[in-house]
Every structure is written in C-alpha cells, then in structure tokens.
Image (cartoon, coloured by chain):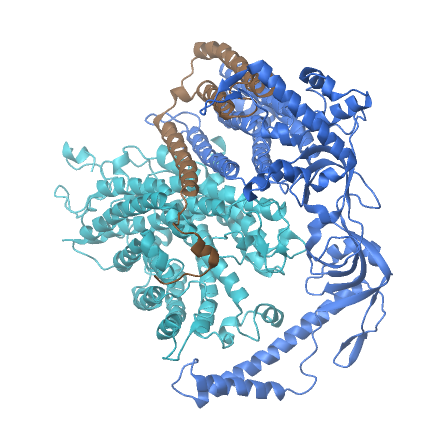
Chain colours: A blue, B brown, C cyan
Amino acid sequence: MEIPYIVNPRKDTGLTNSKIAIWLFLASEVMLFGGLFSAYIFLRVYADYPWPERALPVLPGLINTFILIASSVTVVMAWASLKLRELTKFRIYMSITVLCAGLFMVLKGMEYNAKFHHQAVRLNDYAVVEGHLHPHEGLKGTEITIEAETVSIDLFKFSKSYYADFSAEWDGKLQLEKALVVDGEEIFPAGQAISVDMLSQAKELFINNRANNAEILEDKLRQSWKFAKEETPGENNRNAERKKLQNDKYKELVDAIPAGDLKTAVGSLTFKATSPIALHIDPKKIYKSASDKEGDSGSIVLNDGTTLAGTMGNSDIVLDVDAISFRHTVMQAEKMGIDPEAAIANSWLLKDEGIKTLWDNHLIVVEKLEQHLLEEYKTKTDANGNEVAKRVPTEADRYRMGWKEIVALEELQKAGKDLHDLTHQEIQDAYPSMTAGFTGADHKSGKYNFPKLTIPREQVLFESKFTPAWNNYYAIYFTMTGLHGLHVIGGAIVLAYYLFFGTGMYRKNPEWLANRVEVGGLFWHFVDLVWIFLFPIMYLM
Amino acid sequence: MAHSIEEVKKSQKKFLIVGAILFIGTVVTVAVAKIPALDIGVHGFDTADLILGLLIATIKASLVLMIFMHFTGEKFMVYFSMGIAVIFTICMVWLIGWSKADPIQFENEDVFRSGIVTES
Amino acid sequence: MSDHADHHNPGFIQKYIFSTDHKTIGIQYGLTAMLFLLFGFYLMIMMRWSIAYPNEPVPEWMSFFLNDTWKAQWLQNGKMPGETYNMFGAMHGTIMVFLGVVPLGFGAFGNYVTPLQIGAPDMAFPKLNMASYWLYLVGGIIMCASFFLPSGAAKSGWTNYPPLSFFADTQHPNQWMTGQTQWLVGMVFLITSSLLGSVNFITTIINLRAKGLTWFRMPFLVWAMLVTGFILLLSFPPLEVAGIMQLVDRVWDSSFFQPSGLYHREIGLVNAAGGGSPLLFQHLFWFLGHPEVYVLLLPAIACVAEIIPVNTRRPLWGYKSMVYGVLVLGFLSFIVWAHHMYMTGMGPAISTFFQTTTNLISIPSVILLTCLIISLWGGSIRFTPPMMWACAFLPMFGIGGLTGLPLAFSMLDLHLHDTYYVIGHFHYVVAPGILFGLFAGIYHWYPKISGRYMSKVLTHLHFWPSLILINFLFFPMLIQGMAGFHRRWYNGGDAYVVTDPESANVFGKVVAEHIDLNILMSTSAWLLAVAQLPFIINVLSAWIWGKKVENDNPWNATTLEWATPTPPGHGNFTKEPIVYRGPYEYSRPEVDEDYYPQWQAPVKPKAETNKDA
C-alpha cells in the first residue's frame, strides 16, 4: 500500500495531506506568535519604565512592509501561473519573491547593525543619554579599566580559550605571588611567570588531589557510620547516641590518617604584577565588581572566577550625544512624590554646560510647540469647567530630545538665531528631513554636529548598546523580528527550492508542483500577515 | 482545491487589487502616525492611533487571509484548527492579563511592611 | 510516489536506524524513552538516599559509575550536597516528563498503533516522522550531556522558574556551555520534535483513515491521539516562546523575566535593565505545563480503553461519551493552567475562574474513568498480563485524580502548595497511573510487534511487587505533605526536626513525627527498581524464547491493527482494509465467535450492522 492523497484531495475531507499539515503548522504558528504578542502586551502594559513608543526609524520598516506585500502578491501570482500552466511566468514571479526575501533581510540587517553600534546610558538619576561611543584612552567601547596589581585564577574554571583573551596583556608581567607548595614539594617557585602550561598543570594537580582527598574522607565517613550502626543496633540515624558515636569516630579516623595521604588541594593561584597592568574589561565578562569610581581600590570577579585586584582606572563613557531623555527620571520622581521639574534640574546631566544649553533651548521648543498646538486646535472645556488646550505636547515631546532636534538646535545656534524669535514651523524646518539618517541618527555622513559628553563611570546606573539588554522594548523587538526573520529565511529557502528544483515535479505532474507552491505560499502569506501586525506595533505605536 | 482555469484568471486581477489596497493601507497608517496634520485623537500616540492602526492591520491581515490564502473556500478541518488556535490565543492573552490585573488586595498592607503580625 | 518501490529492500541502516517506517520509529521511540525512564529513575534513587539518610555517604552500589573526580565535584565526602540534589531533581522531572513518558505514550504507541488502527499504510509524512524522532533524540542527548559540563546540568527544577534559573550557572566563561542554557536548547529541539510529530499525527488521522472508518468507528486510542496531537500542537508554542525569551535573557542579557531592582546575595544589585516579570514565565510555562499532563495521560488511558473491551469480551461502555469527554477535556485543559500559580498573588476573581475550570475538567476525567470501570461490569474478564495492569491503572489513577481535587481549591492550596502532597498527587497520576497504563499497552501489543507472547511468570513477578511497592512509595508522600514537608528538601526534613517535647516549635515536632516515613519510601523506591528487572528480562527474552502467537489476532480483538500480518511488513496491510462497523463489537449475536472484527465483511448483510456503533 502506498500513502494516498499526496496530490489529489481526499473526498470527504476535501484536502490533501500537505494542505492539512500546513494549516496545522500555521495554527501552531498562531500560538507561537500569539505567545509573543501576549508577552509584548504584558511587558508593555505593566512596564515600570517609559515605553519608547515610536522610537524606531520608520522608513526601513515601511520599505520592508512594501517588500513583503509585494512578495506576497508575487507568490500568489506564481501559483496562479502554475495553475494556468505558464512555467516561465511562474519562474519570474518566484524569482521576484525570493529576491524580495533577500532584500527584506538586508534591510533588517542594516537596522540591526545600526542598533548594535548605538550606545545608551542610564544615569543614577535615571536620565538617559544615547549616542555613539567616542574612543578614548585605549577604550574602544564601555570597558571597565582596572590597574590590576594581583590576579587570582580559579583553577577549576580555568579554560585555555578564555585565558587567551587576556594573555597578550598578562604574559611576562605577572608572577606567582607565593610558591605553590604541595605536600612539602615546591611545584612552582614564587616569582615564576604566568603561562598556560603552568595553569593547566596546576589545574590537573588540584583536581587529582581533590579527588584523592575526597576518596579517603569518604572512606572514613563510611567506616564511622558502619561503626556507629554496629554500636547502636535497632536505632535509626537520628538517634543522638549514634550521631555522637559517628561524629567522634569520624574525627578519630580523620586524625589517624597518615601524614601525606591527604594532599593539599590548591584551587586558585594568585599572581602579582611587576607593575600595575591596565586592563580594559568588557562588562559582559564581569560577574561582579566592587567599585566603579576612578582611583578607588577595587576588585573585579570575572565570569571564569578570575579575580582582579588593584586600582580602578578611567572607565568614563564618552559619547557623541544624539538623544537625551528625562522620561524615566520624571516617572521615578512621580513615583516618589518629587516634583519632576526639580528632579530634572538636579540631574547630573544638566551640570554639563553644553547639555544645559541644549536643554534650555529644548524647553523653548516645547513652549513653541505648545503655543502652536493651542493656535492650531484651540481649546475645550474640561470636566471642571476650565479652558484647556485640545492638544498638548506629549511626555516624549517634553522630556526627550531626539537626534533631529539636537542637530537642528546646534545648527540654529551656529547660525546665531535666537529661538525666541522663531515660530514653531521655522524650527521644524531646520530639522533633517524624513529620509535623513535611514536607520537612525546620522553620525557617518559628517553633515551633523553632535555634542560630546564625558560620563564618569560612577554616574552610570546601567549602560548597553541598543541590544536586547537595553530594555524590554528592544528585547521583544529583537526577539519578535528575529523569529520573524528566521521564518522569512526558512520560507525563502522552501520557495527557492521550488523555483530551482520544481521543474522535475512540474514535468511529472504540474498539479503536484502547483499544490506544493500553494502550500509554500500559504506559509509565506502567514509570514507577511505577522509582519502586518509587527510593523505598526513596533514602529508606529 | 478546485480552482478552474477561468477562476484563476479572474482572481489574478483580484490579487493585484488586493496588493494595491495593502500598499495604501500601510501608507495611511504611517501617515496618521507621522504627519502631525493627519493625527487623529490628541497629539502624539494615543488610544485612537492604537485602534486605527490595529484596525487597518486587521483589515490588511484579513485580506491576505481571505484572498491570498483562499481561506474563504476552505474545508472544515482548516477552519477547526485555525479556530481553536485563535480561541486559545485569545484565552492566553486575556487570562494572563486578567491574572496580572487582579492582584490580592489587603486591607492593611502596613502589616506586611513592618514584618510583625500581631495576634488579634 | 514512484520512488516508493525503492523502500522495499532497504539496507540495515535504512531499515533500523534512519527508518521512515512508522513501526520502526515507534519502537525506536519506545526503547529510547524507556532508557531515559531508567536514567530518570536512577537519578531519583540517588535523591531518595539523600532524603532518607542525609548524613550518610551514598552507598557504593549507587555511585559506582562516578569516578573519583566526579565524586569530588558532585559529592561531599560521598554525601549528596543540596546543589547536586537540585540538579538531579530538575533533571529527574525533565527527563521523566519530556524524555520519558511523553515519547513512550505519544511517540511509541502513537506511532506504532495509530496508523495500524486506522488502516493506513504509514504516517502521512514518513520523513517528517523520522526527523521528529531524531530531533527528540538530539534534544534529549543535549540535555543529558550537560551533566558533563563544568557547570553540571540544569538545576532550577523542571519548571525552570526565573529569577532562580537566571542566576543559576551565571558565573561561567561561556554561557552557551552551561547546563541551564543547554536545558533551553534541548527544549527547543524537543518542542520542534513534538510539533512535527503532532502535525503528522493529526494529518494521518484526518486523511489516512481506511475506507468505511468514519469518525465514530475510530477506536478510542485514535481519538485520544488526535486530541493529544492538538494539545501538543497548540500548547507547546507558548513554552517555546518562554524558552526562547529565557535564552535571550541568558545569552543576550535581556530582562524579560527580571524585575527592576533585582538583588542577589553575592552580586548585589543585578546589572540588568529590569522591568520584566517572573510571572510572565510562569504563565507561558504552565500554558504548556498543564495541557502536558493530559499529553501524558491520554495515551495511557487510551491503552487501557483498548485493553478492557478485549479482555472483558464486551463493548466499551459509553464509547461516545468517552469521545465527547476526551474532546471537552482537551479543550478545557488550555484554560486551567493558573491553578499552579495560586500562590503568586492572584486576586479572588481570577482565582475563582481557574478554580471553576479546574473543577470542570474533573468531570470529563471522571467520565473516562467511570466508563472504563463500568465496562468491567458483567464482562467475562480474562486476566491476561495486559489486563492486570489495566485493572491496576483504574484505582491508582483514581487516587491520583482524587488527590488533585483539594489542590484545585486556592484555600487548600495555600497549605498544600509545594509540599510532598503535590508530589504524591502527581506521582500517583504519572507512575502507578500513566506508567501502569503504558505497561499494559506494552504487554498488549508485544505479540503484534514481535509475534511472541511475553512470559506470564515474569509478568506476575513484575506486576505484584510494582503495585505494592509503588503504593508504599507514594502514599506516605500524601501524609508527609499534609504535615507540611516541603517538596525540595534535599535532606528530607532532617534540618527541621525538633525532638524536645517541651519545645514551642510545633512544626519541628510534626516533622519529627513523620520523618521516618522517608526510610520506608526510599526503601520501596529501591525495591521498585529491582522489581523492574523481570520486565526488562521479559521484554528481551520473549523476543527470542517467547511462545509464538497462533495467529495474527492472538487476543481475538476487533480493531484493525490485528488484521495485519505479524509483525506487520512495510505498508502494513496486505490488502486494503475496509471497515464495516464500530471498534468494540464483542459478543454480537449475529456471529458465532464472541468478537466481530471491524474488517470482517458482514455475514448476512443486515441493515443494523452497517450502522455506526
């Protein structure tokens, strides 16, 4: 017997096998994206930080939407061409579809790339600064600098590949602090230079000795229990007398172990630097750190258990600022019952002259906007009978400056214009156009000036690139669009397979290929359908 | 599925029209969100924008589903599996939201703050 | 397909390893799942030692396979420390549920029996079926291989709740190479596997039914597999979402499940964005977690439902109500999940909702069980090996189900939550319940698979000790749980014992009263392991020395799988089967035999014999 209903549908269900399968698969996909959407709603509605609505540059998203819609049309046209037995047309339409998929992923890649290179810093007062990192003093990114004097290595977790990351800075500069003496035998003398071989050897020794000790002690523990059980028959292990007997016996047995049987198991080696080594540590590799402030004596524990001790160096973050936001500050202030304006005025950020000027100008811009909205949309009477403006600036308008506003204000200032004399519209005209900075703030072209800001590390509460780590908005953005992107790639592979290897199927039975393309197309439309929702909720809301 | 040649020929035109509608719908959503003059509701993002955006998205999605995916002429099993998936998705969103929105409320929360519970 | 003919003479590897035949895949699933079950059992044996004798070194017969280095790493002078216990506990749960029982019930029985019972030549997508098995195996191996990593395997319970799981294994150079991350990676494989599996099953059942096999002529097992397939299809994706989100949390440092201001004893204020919610994980997890219980249960109850009519020689009582029951059960199972979360601060309105649905779902469960019990009434019962297990299933699963009722009420759950009562409840459901049902299935279909009967003597040696010991193992848990024993105590409560009768510590005294049950339970567990030896010997030896079956239908059953040759060849049926009647036509007056197979053409074409059952 052969498997039926591969090409022709079964009479009573009216469906082929693959048609049922794809719809079932789509049902499960509905649950998958349903789960993600419910996570999105949950995270957004109950966010205890300002949700960055309308934060992404719309243009790439919009183009991607057009691309996906176009590909959806072409894939259904490809199917229709097969139904009409027009193989050439099918090939053309299918090629366009696959090309669209590629284009979509390229744009997606550009968007991701821009975010991976865009830095954000949350200060202790919850003010947020965004911008591009400005390399300085040997710091490429946001590394923490420590002038390490001693380095202790956890031998159990020691791994060669991880060590290699540091060896360039360490080799020749670190010496063993104390001689490694195991059972009277000096394995490594004090002052021996650090090396991979030495650490590997010490690791092996540690593991062997530890195993040796555990074996002996386990045996003694067993003997002590055996003895205690024989002495107290009929009792159970919680019997006080038995416990005491066992405990005493164990001590006695351990004391009686011949000298030399138990080996010293040294689990970590400490090295001294001949002169303090400046190490720049990627924050991702840090498990915990005692202090961030420059000049403090500090210690850093890395993820592999290595402890660096010494003086904290310069770990300042230097940014070409392209956005400032006090929205989180305001939120926290309101939560604690503090006046938001005062909280902003007290912010460390406004102690910087340049930023302060920028912010003062921003307040004028907000004022102009408020005026403009009042003139444009007039007033209404609220529930208390007061005359209020119909439209007012939003939280984001008031407490956040985006990159376009920053460059526009810098520009106007350079041109020597007083903001007070300008109208709302005139200020708006100074903003870069909608197409400027395709994937966000345009640092590359050199057309725009961004103010430079140095943030001392101790002012930083949290910093990250615009990766999932920055906040849950970006986390869910990357997760959802990433999963969607994987679907795009998967779908494109399947469709490309029909494009390049479908001819054989077509020759055997055109209807067979048409069915397969229909099934692949159904998946493709679903991918489009998900994007139709993803685009507004991520880019426009 | 029983798609006769005439039907397919006819629907080709339909596909192109739907594609055009999808384009227009996208442009409208973006315009409402981005151009201040077209902003509905109050200034900036608000419920009206949310409803409009999701409404247009839903219309677009149903066009894709109905026309491109021929969902209108499908068989019972397809409706059944998609139907329960949608029902369970709604249940999931609704119940997770409800669970969070309905926390236990205590008359005197200070009891928990001080960490001392006196016997009554 | 035209290339189908090539499959008839496959080489060894194609026939037994990378097979696309549903029967081979079913056996592969079964054997793999049983190996995983043994491994999970073994972890539990070690854990039970730590519970019963917390201060004594683990005996050598348990720790024999650990070398000295491992002992030094995972044991403390031979004793089991809490961390190792947690690791074993987390992996015991994960292995038993995801790698053991589900693949045995759904993967093995579903694959082997379902296509035979609906008269199909194979599954609808044989290659997908193979992929499904291999993804499962890879996922399982990835999870178990994490024992060999420096971090050890996952250690945050089988539920993997953040932020506990978030902090586990953070201090490692490479986050990918930690047990906690590998658990998530393995899970993604398992989820993909069951997704492919369930799509395949549902398609097969919908489209590949034999001629005349209308919906209400399908055996109950097929119905159960259909519902199980839908549950897997729709409830696993949210867990996949949760798993992916946790993976992003671990590897790309997001804060989906980490609230703001999270503080850690060692690290201090955690360097993360915050703003997430641990409860979101629990919701997404239990959205799968609860339906998963029915994924475990339905194949087992379905096996029992197949075995009882055969061995009572009368139709299944209330077949239609059982079918409707299982459909309602499947539907309701999606909206009861938060009864696992009464302690998370849910308010009265929402917890009332979940209490209501939880109690509603007990109705279809009771319908299923009652129908099976009533089916016994008035039958001429043959106590064949499968029937013994099936009969034991009924009361054992009954205890499991009834002990669940108190947990459905939030007020009682306040006291019983996270105690051994919960452990006792679900182990009653899963071990003497579901596993007994699956044992019944193995004994029932073994003659079809191998062409030989399993030994009756060995069956008795397996059955009676198992039945007695498993009750000694799990019943005391219910008592301990009501006394307040916490489910995650690695020393069985030793640290809480108060022996001084004058003490004001009531709890300590209650613990002291019940702690010695631990020894009884642990001893039963170890003896239970011994009691499985006859089974292993039986399965292996019967393959060679077992008594051969007399014909293709040794139990004189009525469903289609017995119409195939023994063992069924590639393509299953020698001629296309046609179904004439319902699945459980026993003791019908119109035929001389006491059974009237589905495939047997009507003797005298009467109008009523063609009707649905």
For the C terminus of chain B, the quadrant is: bottom left
Residue nearer the viewer, C612 or C506:
C506
**Residue C363 picture location, percent across and down:** 25, 46
Residue C383 sits above or below residue C469 on the image: above
**Residue C54 picture location, percent across and down:** 47, 74
The answer to whether any part of residue C443 appears in the image is no
**Residue A181 appears in which quarter of the rendering?**
bottom right
Q: Seen from this angle, which residue lies furthest left?
A: C589
Q: Seen from this angle, which residue lies furthest front?
A: A385
For residue A361, side relative to residue C39 (left or right): right
Residue C476 sits above or below residue A87 on the image: below
For residue C281, side relative to residue C436 (left or right): right
Measuring 62% from the left and 46% from the top, which residue is drawn there? Answer: C253
Measuring 48% from the left and 61% from the top, which residue is drawn there? Answer: C89
**Residue C402 picture location, percent across and down:** 27, 56
**Residue A240 appears in which quarter of the rendering?**
bottom left
Q: How many marks?
A: 0
Residue nearer the viewer, A396 or C250:
A396
Residue nearer the viewer, C442 or C246:
C246
Residue nearer the viewer, A461 or C512:
A461
Residue C264 sits above or below residue A412 on the image: below
Residue C96 sits above or below residue C4 on the image: below
**Residue C345 picture location, percent across and down:** 42, 49
**Residue C484 appears in which quarter of the rendering?**
bottom left
For residue A247, side relative to residue C492 (left or right): right
For the N terminus of chain B, the quadrant is: top left
The answer to whether any part of residue A532 appears in the image is yes
